[in-house]
Image (spheres, helix red, strand yellow):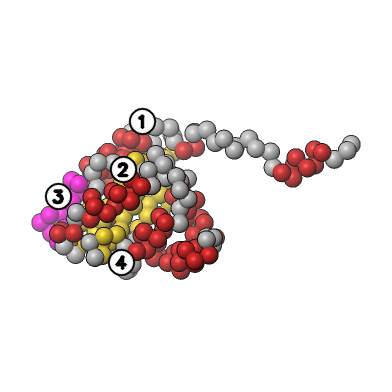
């Protein structure tokens, strides 16, 4: 069974977090779609709340610490990205933006992405289109058509079915993209066969 790696970025600040809840719901929906097609799924969760200080340190020093480096590697090495942020002041959170600011330019080029956001009221749902989509267009990610916004009243209320349908539609779109492309592990790595420098030096020693 082929394995697909999903990097899930959650910028929720509280515990428990509705942003994390939406990220989990999206992840499970994508996992179910891929499993029904015979694909195994590995999830790399990146909780930005735990990386707030390393992200700030990276912004002022230009170098990621080990926890942030692992998170960056998880996101840039995955087959697809699910990114979910709370909406503050009609846009993504500063922590969410700061994390994607520290990625190298082009790191997400062509990478399938599913976007989600949470907020206190449905009036802020347009932030998906005027804030998140432009950001990921700049990052050159391949964002699926359906993005998911969950307001406070969507959880356990009359709109729960509507939210579920949005999640399933978005998950189906991301899964369809992943099923059409090779997994990250099968893509050609131009540096896969590079001989380590120490081995090259050892080969130069006279025999």
Q: CA distance from mark 4 to mark 1?
A: 35 Å
Give how far across and how far down residue 28 sits, in percent: 31, 48
Tags 1 and 3 in contact by the CB under 8 Å rule? no
Tags 4 and 3 in contact by the CB under 8 Å rule? no
Q: Quadrant of the C terminus?
A: top right
For the residue labelled by badge 3, is the local secondary structure a helix, a strand or a loop?
helix
Task: Tell me the mark number nearer the camera, choosing from 4 and 1.
Answer: 1
Other-residue count near label 3 (Cα within 10 Å), few / some / many at <14 / 14–19 / ≥20: few
Residue annotated with mark 4? 16
Q: CA distance from mark 1 to mark 2?
A: 15 Å
Other-residue count near label 2 (Cα within 10 Å), few / some / many at <14 / 14–19 / ≥20: many
Q: Does label 3 or label 2 sit earlier along the sequence?
A: 2
Q: Does label 4 or label 2 sit earlier along the sequence?
A: 4
Mark seen at residue 143: 2
Q: Residue at x 28, y 48 (%)?
A: 133
For the residue labelled by badge 2, is the local secondary structure a helix, a strand or a loop?
strand
Task: Tell me the mark number nearer the camera, choosing from 1 and 3.
Answer: 1
Q: Does label 1 or label 2 sit earlier along the sequence?
A: 2
Residue annotated with mark 3? 162
Q: Residue at x 10, y 56 (%)?
A: 158
Q: Quadrant of the N terminus?
A: top left
What is the span of residues highlighted in magenta in the rendered image? 153-166
Give how far across and how far down residue 180 sits, in percent: 36, 30
In the picture provided, is 6 more to the left or to the right than 152? Answer: right
Residue annotated with mark 1? 180
Q: CA distance from mark 4 to mark 3?
A: 22 Å
Magenta highlight: main SS: helix
Q: CA distance from mark 4 to mark 2?
A: 27 Å
């Amino acid at each position: 069974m082929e394995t697909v790696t999903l990097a899930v970025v959650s910028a929720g600040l509280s515990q428990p977090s509705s942003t994390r809840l939406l990220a989990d719901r999206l992840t499970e929906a994508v996992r179910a779609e891929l499993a029904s097609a015979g694909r195994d799924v590995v999830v790399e969760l990146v909780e930005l709340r735990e990386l707030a200080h390393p992200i700030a340190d990276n912004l002022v020093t230009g170098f990621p610490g080990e926890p942030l480096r692992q998170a960056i590697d998880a996101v840039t090495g995955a087959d697809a990205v699910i990114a979910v942020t709370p909406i503050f002041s009609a846009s993504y959170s500063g922590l969410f933006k700061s994390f994607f600011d520290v990625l190298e330019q082009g790191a997400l080029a062509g990478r399938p992405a599913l976007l989600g956001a949470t907020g206190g009221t449905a009036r802020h749902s347009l932030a998906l289109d005027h804030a998140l989509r432009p950001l990921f267009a700049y990052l050159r990610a391949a964002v699926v058509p359906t993005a998911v916004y969950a307001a406070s009243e969507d959880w356990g209320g009359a709109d729960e079915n509507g939210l579920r349908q949005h999640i399933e539609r978005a998950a189906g779109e991301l899964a369809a993209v992943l099923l059409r492309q090779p997994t990250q592990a099968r893509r050609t790595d131009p540096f896969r066969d590079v001989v380590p420098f120490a081995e090259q030096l050892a080969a130069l020693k006279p025999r």
